[in-house]
Amino acid sequence: MNTFDSSSRLRIPPSPTGSLHLGTARTALYNMLLCKRYQGTLIFRLEDTDKERSKSEYVSDIINGFKWLGIEWDEGPFRQSEHSFRHKLVVQELLNKNLAYECFCSQEDLDILRAEQRKNNQAEGYDNKHRNLTIEEKENFRKLGKKPVIRFKLNENEDIIWQDLVKGEIKINTSDLGGDPVIAKENGDVLYNFAVVVDDHDARITHVVRGEDHLHNTAKQIALYKGLDWDVPIFGHVPLIFSEHKEKLSKRKHGDIANVSNYKNKGYLAEAIINYLIAMSWTYPEQGREIFSLEEAIEVFDIEKMSKSPAIYDQNKLEWFCKEYFKRLSSEEVLEKAKEFFKDKETIINFSLYSEQELISMFSLVKDGLVKIIDLEESLNFFFQDTIEIEKSSFDDLPQAFDILKTMHKLLISQEESTQDPKKLLNTLSLKTEIKKGKNLFFPIRLVISGTTHGPDLAESLRILGNEKVIKRIEKVI
RNA sequence: GGUCCCAUCGUCUAGUGGUUAGGACACACCCCUUUCACGGGUGUAGCACGAGUUCGAAUCUCGUUGGGACUACCA
């Protein structure tokens, strides 16, 4: 059962009530994959019916995030708020058809009702009390200064059934939907479940692919489609991204990892994020294939092969993808990306301190194993620092450390040896000091030039740093 | 509480009635390396449980358990 073709119209409908969420990006990505594969049309719509919470800064964050990731759409961005006139018309239509009604229950009434239901172990929800208010009753409420919300009349005890693209048949009874849903607030603003139906219908959306947290909304929305006598789109509910504690990833609780801009700001590779996001819940048909481009995924992406269960966000796996992508880049490319990344940032990395050739050598030392551009500050900082801070105690477990350094200093000063032939320098040192174990020879030198025993290849590092810097650093210690 | 979804190594997954249950990440060990990495190799580790259907069940059915989502005049 493949329902997609070139007449398919899908959508990405983020809400600008927060910055771009990783899960939003992922469902957008799935929608785009499907659209591109079947040459359908992708509509971008901002769900900004909540005027209080929607902010223009979030709009640009979301759009920038999508652009950065390479998520493209065909139509839009549209704003749901632009359709408010149309929304009100449809509300009126529902009212006229007696499919919706005015409800004067106050928030307090509802709270009391819910508390009561909870106490009695009943399902919480509105009891549809105001479904059949007489004209007089309504007038009385109005005289009391009460303003109504509009509720949509759900058919009683009706099974809403649909064939979900990823979950299979799903059946939810209207009596389990928490009472007649409010479609328009007291102030006339329409609510999500209503606006989304009108907008999707007007945009001639054929497939709604979204997170499984919308499962119950879908039942409400199908009821609305039916009430309005509109064609019901095909639905697909993809699994959620979980945190390591197996709960829905949220920006409030999980901060940076849920925030797309965080990845961008730290210099992650968008291609790696995309690959990880796809691979999270879907497997490339070729056995064992994990690394694939967006273009390759578009060729073969299939929503029916989507996992049904949530994927736990795995930083290790993400970082593995990141490393794989950096490995596939040349040193020159990584250097270019770094220059671009650090361009407007305050950073220790000063590209004018070394020649282009030296920079390329430097980057080739750390390129493999790099997760994100910002990590370069840590792995490369010793090339740029004026003085290296070293804990004196670091030398404690290294016998002959000062012997090595003094010898090295002498060799360099006398120009018997040079950092430009680091292998020979190191060899001579090993012979002169009679140190066999590499660690005892290398660690003191590492400490002196970088302040740490971990880092890029020592010989190459010495060569790039050059005699002058190395001599200076040794002199600070001996 | 109610409704719905989900269930293969710690994690992501392959598997659609007959497999020594495969791969990847992570972890451990070994090799390579006069250091650090990279790379290569090996290993530890899984079908939640119980019935049923069947000659045969990770795979089909039911139940149990566990986890999650939803349950707004948010989206």
Image: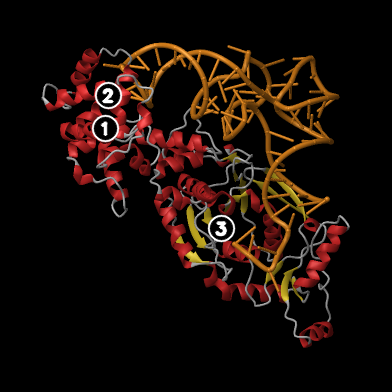
Q: Residue at x 26, y 12 (%)?
A: A434
Residue at mark 1: chain: A
Rate crowding at label 1 as few (under 14), some (14 to 19) or many (20 or more) other CA atoms within 10 Å: few
- Please provide percent x and percent y for residue A299: 45, 39
User: Considering depth in this image, is A354 or A249 the residue closer to the camera?
Assistant: A354
Residue at mark 3: chain: A
Amino acid tagged 1:
Val
Residue corresponding to mark 3: A205
Residue at mark 2: chain: A
Rate crowding at label 3 as few (under 14), some (14 to 19) or many (20 or more) other CA atoms within 10 Å: many
- Please provide percent x and percent y for residue A260: 47, 51
Residue corresponding to mark 1: A477
Q: Quadrant of residue A120 in the image?
A: bottom right
Disc 1 or 2, which lies upstream in sequence?
2
Q: Secondary structure at mark 1?
A: helix
User: Considering depth in this image, is A390 or A210 the residue closer to the camera?
Assistant: A390
Q: Residue at x 30, y 28 (%)?
A: A446
Callout count: 3
Is mark 3 in CB contact (under 8 Å) with mark 2?
no
Seen in the image, is A264 located left or right of residue A257? Answer: left
> Is residue A16 visible in the rendered structure shown here?
yes
Residue corresponding to mark 2: A402
Is mark 3 in CB contact (under 8 Å) with mark 1?
no
Relative height, residue A290 to residue A136 (above, below): above
Amino acid tagged 3:
Ile
Quarter of the image with the C terminus of chain A in it: top left
Is mark 1 in CB contact (under 8 Å) with mark 2?
yes
